[in-house]
Image (cartoon, grey):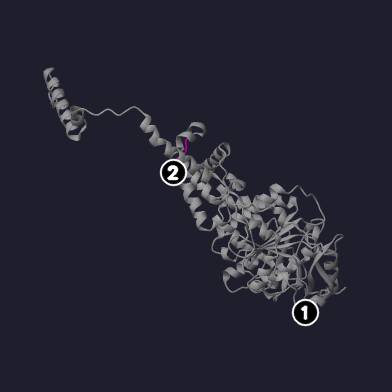
Amino acid sequence: MSITESFKEVIVNGYTSKGDSLILGAAKLNGEVVPGTQVKIPLKTMNRHGLIAGATGTGKTKTLQGIAEGLSKASVPVLLMDIKGDLSGLARPGSPQPFILERSNAAGVTYTPQGFPVEFLTLSDEKGARLRATVSEFGPILLSKILGLNDTQEGIVSVIFKFCDDHQLPLLDLKDFIRVIQYLSKEGKAEFETSYGKMSTTSLGTIMRKVIELQHQGADLFFGERSFDVDDLMRIDDQGRGMISILRVMDLMDRPKLFSTFMLSLLAELYSTLPEAGDEDRPKLVIFIDEAHLVFQEASKALLQQIETVIKLIRSKGVGIYFCTQNPQDVPASVLSQLGLKVQHALRAFTANDRKTIKEAAQNYPETQFYKTEEVLTQMGIGEALVTCLNEKGIPTPLAVTYILPPESRMDVLTDSEIGGIVAASSIVRKYNEVVDRESAYEILNEKLAVVEEEAPAAKKVGRPKEEKSTLDTILSSSAGKQMARTAANLITRTLLGAIGFSGTTTRKKKTSWF
């Protein structure tokens, strides 16, 4: 048996599954596509998370786009974090250009240009349905993690939330939370300490500064009503295709803390809302995070631990998470170890650090007799990737240089008018973009303090009339009178001490020498 025949047998056996699967492309050996070697990902293992990595311009985003299309056709809803704004083309059909047809034919797939059901979402003022969550829904633990508070400060935040629950003070946005801190620092301090214990003024000040810092990153746009329902991410269209929700966050690249806030909130909400899925034939939802390094680069240690924990647990809820980034090292090792699918596009070795990164990346893949992994990582062309995933038994599949299938949707962005048309026709945009500002902690506390201020002058008028001071009292209470009193007291004291044999000075005994 030739090496090509042996390679084909290994790939066919390794990527054959009993259930439905997603075709990623065709396998290559020695630079040539080997006919009949489809590289496929079992849908059953798509909740095992994954990584799509590679240098700029190697085709990562188009690989992500193609996988999203395959999931949508398999009735799996998808959420895409579009950092660069180049995934909107999913909503419109592509064009059958020669290089596209050549790739499809190589994998034995008929190319059918088509658009997919797309919903645009936003965390800011971009076009799309606004995603929000109230401070109360976010909860004291997650809020403390994202603020980077220590254990003592986290305990104070928890007690503040308890105070607000006990006194019916809804915490809807950051304005409410800040007003409560101000109230507990001044007017409500005594009331709070009676029932809940004392709080450090320094700790309250630190919490306030951290909240204001989060505000400066644009968090006011995220916290508030109406809260987003995660069920709206998991819809199927009339043709049975999964809805592709594109979160447009192009203006958040310089505000990573807000992006991390949203990610942690979403994952926690999905985990707490969804029932245990068990071992199903396909995931309930798949999330793709483009430019994933933005999630981790500004995250505190506590936040990273929280993300790691949620990623480990959310798989059992039927949710898969896929990170797309330039360098595999952008993703913490603790998270990287949880990823079942690895799609590695070419890496560039321009510096000594680059070569070190390539060597480390090569060690993360299964051993193979058909490739020198470290060399292949630098020699692949655009639209080619080194692939391994988990088969239906959870065993890593053979390593394969894969000629990636092209997307069937447009490989370019939509125009503003095209995006506007989709947003205008969206039912959830009308649902979530309505401004809601009901009475909450901010208004309740302001009203309470206004009533107290109105009652204070009246109480002074009803009270006992103030007696006028006598002339002697006026003199004695003045600074000059107080000084006269102190002088007289000192004179009397010295006179008394002299009368009983003490003088105003002490005398020292003469020291007796031993010599």
At label 1, the amino acid type is: Pro
Picture coordinates of residue 219, whole percent (x, y): 55, 56
Q: Say if residue 215 shows up in the picture.
A: yes
Question: Residue 384's x, y, as percent?
Answer: 72, 73
Of the residues shown, which amino acid type is indicated by label 2?
Thr
- The number of numbered badges drawn on the structure is 2
Looking at the rendered structure, the secondary structure element under dot 1 is: loop
Report whether 513 appears left or right of 286. left
* Image x and y of residue 136, in percent: 59, 46
Residue marked by disc 1:
96
Of the image marks 2 and 1, the number of the one nearer the N terminus: 1
Q: Nearer the viewer, mark 2 or mark 1?
A: 1
Q: Which residues are magenta?
A: 198-202
Q: Which residue is mark 2?
A: 202
Give the prevailing secondary structure in the magenta stretch: loop
Query: Of 444 and 78, which appears nearest the observer?
Result: 444
